Image (cartoon, rainbow, N blue to C red):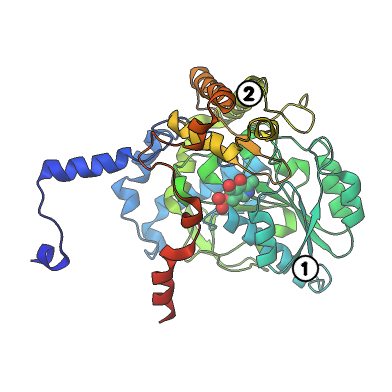
Amino acid sequence: MIRREIGLPRVSQPQIVRHYTRLSQMNFGVDTGTYPLGSCTMKYSPKIMEKIAAHPQVKHLHPDQPVDTVQGILEILHELAGFLEEITGMDRFSLQPAAGAQGELTGALMIREFNRSRGELKIRREMIIPDSAHGTNPASARMAGFAVVEVPSDEYGYVDVEALKSVLSHRTAGMMLTNPNTLGIFEKRIREVADMTHEVGALLYYDGANLNAIAGIARPGDMGFDLVHLNLHKTFGTPHGGGGPGSGPVGAKGEMTDYLPTPIIERVGDRYRFTNSLKHSIGRVHPYHGNIAVLLRAYVYIRLYGAEGLRRAAEIAVLNSNYMKARLVKLPGIELPFHPEIPRKHEFVASFESLRRETGVSLKEVAKRLMDRGFHPPTVYFPLIVPEAFMAEPTETESKEEIDRYCEALAQIVQEARTQPEKIREAPRETSVSRIDEARASRPSTMIPSYTWLKK
Ligand SMILES: Cc1ncc(COP(=O)(O)O)c(C=O)c1O
């Protein structure tokens, strides 16, 4: 009856199974191939984490249950917050934010509230952000009401400390940084940057998207950061393609812990409960207590790896990235900007500008051709300070053989750009969706019906 009403076709079980299996095979994920998307940390996530996150004792919990009936999960979350404190050198964490960008907004709102409580809200209006930063940093700062002041990178790819000095003032509310930065370069003058920021009464915010390079080795808290967010879905493994699911817990040090979102879990004797008692809390940033399934996966990941395992994962991530970088920069037309001799961390950024100039083939076309070879394209055109920027992050979970296969595919494409550029211009041809009409795809035509509907 219902089937007839909504017009569903009548099909057999094999037909429906084949249909959905085929659809699943049209997708590309870290389970199907190498996915070295820079800045996104697409590592392979151990399947045990999926099993535990889907366990009936977890998935049937409801956030409105009385706390006495959810003591187990509260204990796990409380313990997870403790692990994150230890890993980052912060004093307390809120697990509420549901993505890295929401963590940034939370941190920026905490800085704003901090200034309000000390009567400086109207004076400290500026947030300093390096020109290599991820776009969400300035967006979050603007959403929290700050004016963004951009600071340039120097010739080595570090924050230009002299330029920073010239923009720091009594108007500075804070500075947002990721370390290693988005070029994959570790800011070695970070203590100096922290001291300079603190000297003018401002706070230093750590964008934890790149923690995979340093987890278990160095801690933002020891570098002088006051606030951090982590991208648990990246560093601590949750499959997160296509924009979700995520988790961006925010940690704070010293007096900034008072500004964290509430409610927050606390332990009293051997029981756990929620408290709203933080004096200057910015309040809720999530309708409930965070993205529990991602938090739980992160907990399992940390327990599985242990301190030694986390360190080893970071070391191998850095080794893999430097190996891939060393192979790729040997290819004609590919260069490593900002002093190639400086070691990169978990990711690196190369420029394909020479190749484009010599052959007319753009990096975007190279990236599409990589899809024909069975690889996910890299992050392209970011950071904005590198022309034809190619950003790769192989992660610790790719083997040397896989990285070699990737580099060989890229070498063939670079050669093709010189000998048969038309082949690249037509790519991808081997994927389930071939080359799309980009002008048409970027027009908002598909949005118009829902937008019209929204306005009604
Ligand atoms: C450096 C950096 N900061 C922040 C973010 C935002 O994180 P999310 O995608 O979880 O919102 C990203 C995401 O790619 C990033 O690479």
Total numbered circles: 2
Kind of residue at badge 1: Asn
- In the rendering, at what x and y percent does residue 278 appear? 63, 65
Q: Would residue 80 be seen by someone viewing this image from the given angle?
A: yes
List the residue tagged with mark 1: 115
Viewer-proximal residue, 205 or 242? Answer: 242
Q: Would residue 35 be seen by someone viewing this image from the given angle?
A: no
Labels 2 and 1 touching (C-beta < 8 A) = no
Q: Give the answer, above or below, for where 210 lies relative to 207.
A: above
Relative side of 255 to 63, left or right: right
Determine which of the numbered discs, if any, sits on residue 144 in the image.
none
N-terminal label among 2 and 1 = 1
- In the rendering, at what x and y percent does residue 168 appear? 88, 57
List the residue tagged with mark 2: 328
Give me the residue at 61% from left, 23% from top: 324
Q: Residues within 10 Å of mark 1 (few under 14, many from 20)?
A: some
Q: In the picture, residue 149 is in which quadrant?
A: bottom right
Farthest residue in the bottom direction? 456
Q: Secondary structure at mark 1?
A: helix
